[in-house]
Amino acid sequence: MYESILDALRRGDATAAVAAARDAVTAQPQDPTAHRLLANALRLQGDTAGARDAIDAALALAPDNADMHLERAGLLLGERQIDEAQAALARSLGLDPNQFSAYILQAHLALGRGDLDEAERITRTAARIAPEHPQIAALEGTLALRRGDAERALKLLSAAAERAPEEPTLRHALAFAYLANGHFAFAEQAFRSLLSSQPDSRPLRGLIAQLVARQGRPGDAADELAPLLDTESSPALQRTVAELELQAGRFEQAMPRLRALFEAAPTDRRTLGALVTAWQQLGAIEDARSVLDGALVEHAQSPDLWHARLLFEPFAGPEARAIIERWRAAMPDFVPALQAHATVFDAAGETEQAEALALRITELEPGHTQAEMRVIDGLLRRDPEAAIARIDSLLERADDAGVKQGLRSLLGRALDVAGQPESAAATWAELHAEVAEQRLPLPPHSAPIRQWPPLAPLPADAPGVLLLWGAPGSLVERIAVAFEIAGAPLRADRFGAQPPHDDLQRYTTVNELVSGGLDGAQLVERWRALLPARNAGEGNIFDWLLWWDNALLLALRPHLPEAVVMVALRDPRDMLLDWLAFGAPMPLAVRSPNEAARWLAQVLAQIAELHERDLFPHRLVRMDDIADDPVAVAYALGQALDIQVPPAPDGAFGPRHFPAGHWRSYRTALADAFALLEPVAQRLGYPAA
């Protein structure tokens, strides 16, 4: 779309560039890039005033685009004549100052069209004429910024600004260097110094407001933009100010602006979202109902308005039902409306109606995941064989490998319900084996340790430390959910995208502790050192561990005696079955049920030893009969720690897993694996059969 403009700019054909850019602006008036290219074309043509208007229009559409702000700085440079002192310096060097200005202008034009190599070449040429000129430093710093080297840009521009503190283009580039390096307060000061000489610059004021907001001062940012509202009432600016007022908690001030914006454009999603927030914060339920009902008279085909209207009624109550019925009357076969109606039916226990709607959705959108799952759930209750047939038909039609994997896992569940444990176990085992190479290896185990270091005495007034762990299938994740909802200081980041890089994260720690290559004091010291970066306060900390090995006690006994190890536990055979059927929080490789059982037996034998010999303060939380009951889990945790733990709400634990003892249905299908687990199961207090 922009190629004809860019081609004309490269050729230096100003007339063709302006014509092509004006066509682009006419076709896409809300496209900031089109306005930006028009500014470059007008600048090439010599129309600096028109170029400035065009770049201002681009910035009104994309006020946080740093490159456009830098181009505006270049435009200001183009309008400025080199003063007599600079001309005298140029004459003294025997140079033509107009030639230098032309080079500077050409370099900025190359920057504007994104040709960084050409801009760098021209800058080098200009630098031969006046190497110390501040505009050279501004270009070099800008080039570094555009190439992503913010640190180098800041060095270049800071040094140059010390030599020429009043050079506006240099100060402009320096402000963006501060911004790119995350120095928002310095960037704000730099832009304010520019604003003092350009008080009517709307883009500068808008940028300053964004910087103020990024420093956590949304109210000040709204006040910064407020003067612009006297001369401009564009919806974008009005909405920005209102959103900042919402962030600052000034809901009553935001409301009139949002109401006006909503009346002008009732289907604008961003405005609607902000207005819903204001209504909710002010408790203006009746006003919300009235305004939204009025808008729906004219805009009954807007799903966003219907969703917003439902927010102001009790979930699944008669009022919500009435609204959904109105929605379906306006949009009879609209899938989100059908989904909303099915959700209400489900909440009321009207499963037949919910399943009928789910089936209708699959007719309208074959393969709709949520609806298909709802249909299959219903079939599983009534006719497991029919559920298996439906899943098989979905598998035949599925193209995506991930979708197929999910369907096969569900097929295993259907086979389980249908009383076909051999087929179910085989299905799950095949699935695990297929993805084993993409999973983490099973953590290593240490050999039995005969000599333990003494358990150190409890330090006075030390914050409590809870180390939470559970093997795959233990449903330890439900304990984590219960702690998180209760507001406990649980760190679950070891399972996230940015885990702590400490010794408790590394598999090699086990052997290093046993061999003496890692000192236990070092392990604990490094663990403590990373707590602030993990947003752990100075009080108690609950750390959810990826793995457990008793070798950790070589460090914990002498150096962290205030810790308590909490282990989630179930019958090991139920744990293995759950692991195969539902996976685990830590995606470990399972090449075969027997290999998984052998590893599980080894790690649980260490838990048995920890418990039998009382090697360290610990709590075993047996999840067998309580895993699906948030109240029972909260009670068990409270008893274990002698604290009050409020229960998680119903549904917080997700779908139900197999009940305790379900492993017995798989005695034949997984006989060898269960035989490996039977001894440790008995050590942990579970019956042999």
Image (cartoon, grey):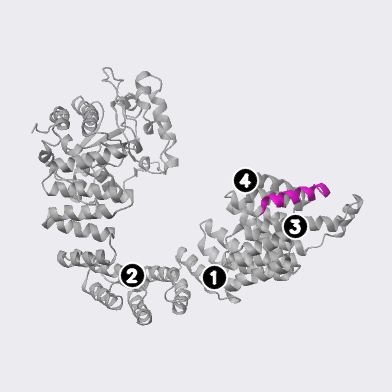
Observer-nearest of 62 and 503:
62
Can residue 121 be found in the magenta stretch? yes
What residue type is disc 3 on?
A: Gln
SS for callout 3: helix
**Which residue, given by chain and number where applicable, does mark 3 sit on?**
106
Q: Which mark is residue 237?
A: 1
Using the rendered view, name the quadrant where residue 531 is placed: top left
Please state which of the two labelled residues, at mark 4 or mark 3, is closer to the viewer.
3
Observer-nearest of 221 and 493:
493
Disc nearer the start of the sequence (4/2): 4
Disc nearer the start of the sequence (4/3): 3
Give how far across and how far down residue 377 sits, in percent.
18, 56
SS for callout 4: loop
Please state which of the two labelled residues, at mark 4 or mark 1, is closer to the viewer.
4
Q: Which residues are magenta?
A: 115-132
Q: CA distance from mark 2 to mark 1?
A: 26 Å
Please state which of the two labelled residues, at mark 3 or mark 1, is closer to the viewer.
3
Q: CA distance from mark 4 to mark 3?
A: 22 Å
Q: Which mark is residue 307?
A: 2
Disc nearer the start of the sequence (3/1): 3
